[in-house]
Image (cartoon, rainbow, N blue to C red):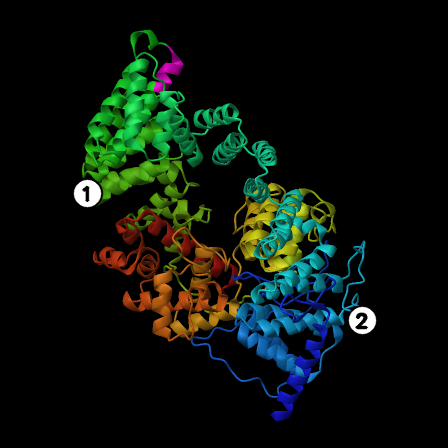
Amino acid sequence: MLWVAFLFVLLLSTVAVVTGCVESEEGQPVIALPELVTVMPTPTLVQGLVTNIPTPTGAGTSSQSDQSPTIPPATVTIEPTATKKPTLTPIPSATIPPEIQLESGWSHLKGENYAEAVREFQSVLLSNQYDAGQERQILFAMGKAALEDGQIDVAADALSQLIAGASGIDATGDSVLETVPDDPSPEDTLVADAFFLLAQVYEERGQCQAAIRAYESYLKLNPDMQAYIQPQIAECHLALGDRSNAVSAFEQAAKGDAYPALKLELNERVAQSYIEEGAYQKAIEAYDQIIGLTENPNILGRAEYQAGWAEILIGNSEAGHDRYIHTVANYPQAFESYLALVDLIEAGLPVDDYDRGLVDFYAGSYEPAVVVLERYIESNPLDSGDARLYLAWTQEKLGDVDSAIQQIDAYIDEHTSAENDQDPDEMSLAANGWIERSKLLARAGRLEDAAASYTTYVGLFPNGDQAPFAAWWSAALEERLGHTDLAAELYEALANDYPQHQDASEALYRAGLVNWQGDDTAEALRLWSRAATEYPEQQFGAAALVWLLKNYPESDIPTTLASDLAGDTYYHLRAQHIVSETIPFQAPEEIDLVLTTFERIVAETWLRESIGLEPGTNVASLSDELLVDGRLVRGEKLWRLGLYQEAKRELESLRIDYAQDPIASYQLALFFKDIGLYRSSILAASSILKTLETDIFNAPTYLGKLIYPAYYAELVQEAAAEYGFDPLLQFALIRQESLFESFAQSHAAARGLSQVIPDTGEYIAQRLEWPGYVLEDLYKPHVGVTFGAYYLGLQLDTFGDDVAVALSAYNGGPGSASRWSAAGTRDIDEYLEIVDFGETREYIKRIYAGQAIYRFLYGK
């Protein structure tokens, strides 16, 4: 193997020559470089790395689903392989065919096994069995993988070699690309992206000047990316202590195109830079520009306060304080409004007590809020507006519920006085007061009082906008209090009085269930029959049918209703499964995860016919309108660079704007699928069915498979086999948890495809003896799939392979699942009624439905 090592050293030394083009601040050679094509990465989670088989695409090219990429032709269906314990293997020997090593490299890259990917790509390069196009792709992929793996020198060498081997570099290392080509070649695009990655390498090394030059080289071919690249350049200037050039870079960034939130952020950064520079007048102008860009009260409050502060700093105290007063009066929920209020009070300037009270309330300064709101009410006893409500909420925060109720009662009396009795606006305010009174009592745990308050509202305002809401909660609270007969009566009254309301079917279902739990079977069957007959298309009409089928089997009525049932909710599917004797979560005997060309042809024919297009019309390629949309162009570039969150924001904006257009949504679904933005692909395809008013069982199979995809198939199948459960169950779980978005993070800090929380991830890593585990590994597909499968398998083992209980443990915690399962039922419908976490109950339902749909689409 010594000769292999010698060749590798020779390769790296050759690459090192490339870096002798521009001197770094450390005296080390750096590069000034041209620009390039890039690889089309497919998903994944850690910023900055390709994760799919690269397919060369230039800016403005449409991505076609089910087409084989030019490079490498044999790897389109490769999925990363799951491993319980990843281990670093030696560089494969020269006897392994390079094409096998190359496929392995792409596979490791997609699964984010970066070290393994680097090893495989290095071996392929040593073999010299590749063409020039493949070499550029391999060098780029190796550079990204090495950068993510922390192999900074390897990344620098690979990217430098790629750049030096491309056209546009002269003997001195300076780019000869003085102008941007009208039609950049794929090579230009790849080199440009390599410059971006090389800039990140230089930043890792602390070579900021070199990083700036590399970023500027990227911008030569991508001037539309100013909003994303100039901030990177600005940070480099700041690191060098060059504040003036940093401000200039931020100014250029703010002029660039980007999604609105980033534009605001950049403008705020420019304004803040002016403040830091002491350029207060320019800062005021910048903040005024921000004020014209948004209606967000928090941003407006911040901008007005900062502009007022700048006015005061240049001696315009009156103008500054006027801005503070405007902030306090108009944006009380903004944090800066509280700062403005403090400054105004310290300056001895008068502030309206109502405005002060609201600002104090939103800032959590409750004691001062009580004082000023009481003072305001005392000064305006006949017209206190919403002051009494805010005072009540403030007193509630301080734990004084009785005083809070007194204020709401006074608010109600104020709007139901004799002179207001016939005024519809005043009566509407009084009605709102009763709702707020009821909600406050419920929040305080005074359920009997809350139920009575809701009932009073229904009696006083039977035609009020919130009457069905109040009727529902009066019944639900009585049920919670154990007053089952009264609860059932109130539920049915809601359905009788408001039959068109969305809660009517659920009210009848709950009324039936309450009677069934109280052993009044005849009344339960009557109510369920009403719900199933009157609301068959709604999920709780189907829920009633499920209970009829389970408890009234001798009648033909439920079976007849079930035969005509259509829908994809849990209860619609359960009714069908009861009739067909399909057990819950039944696994198919065989699965086929392939998307066929025939299925795609059928789907596109159906689309054309549904929209009324001519036969043969191309509905798959991105339209000219989409191709030139800046959001798509920028989003694709950001995705290639590994800036996945930024790319998602641009592309999601595009998807949402075209959600009502089935053809554009189909084109975007394919495009998102091909680059690896799987969540957006699923949502785009789902909007087609919504717009055309059909469901998954009546749409073409190909569309169904876009909505319920089987991404990371090899990972999922291997993990499911390892832990002994149906792989379709894990597909359904991943879809529910993350919509196959591997860089997803929830509000509870759950991460990755299977949404594993940090503590659970640490526990699983210890159990699997996962080497070198760090929290960020949860974003890697091979980790997310494996850890999720292990934890699901653990819950199945713990709860006797009862899938519903195992899923409730996965979502709600093993302790809660133990409590729910203590009832001893193995009937899934009864178990769902025991689960008292609404989120967990819906979680089980959705995965049940998802697994059933996966079985329909992929099962044999």
Magenta region includes residue 332: no
Number of marks in picture:
2
Which part of the image, by quadrant, shows the N terminus? Answer: bottom right
Q: Residue 399 location in percent, x, y?
A: 22, 34
Image quadrant where residue 314 sits: top right
Between the C-alphas of marks 2 and 1, the distance is 89 Å
Asked if residue 698 is positioned above or below residue 298 in the image, the reply reads below
Pointer 1 local density, CA inside 10 Å: few below 14, some 14–19, many at least 20: few
Visible in this render: residue 94? no
Visible in this render: residue 363? yes
Q: Amino acid at mark 2?
A: Ala
Residue closest to the eye, 79 or 166: 166
Earlier residue among tags 2 and 1: 2
Q: Residue 584 location in percent, x, y?
A: 37, 59
Secondary structure character of the magenta stretch overall: helix
Q: Residue 529 location in percent, x, y?
A: 33, 39
Dot label at residue 171:
2
The range drawn in magenta is: 423-429
Is residue 157 left or right of 846 when viewed as pictured? right
Q: Residue 216 location in percent, x, y?
A: 69, 57
Residue under label 1:
518
Asked if residue 806 is positioned above or below residue 305 in the image, the reply reads below
Q: Residue at 34% x, 10% y: name it.
A: 420
- The residue most toward the top is 419
Residue closest to the eye, 601 or 70: 70
Q: Amino acid at mark 1?
A: Gly
Residue closest to the eye, 244 or 697: 244
Image quadrant where residue 447 sits: top left
**Secondary structure beneath label 2:** loop
- The residue most toward the bottom is 2
Image quadrant where residue 364 sits: top left
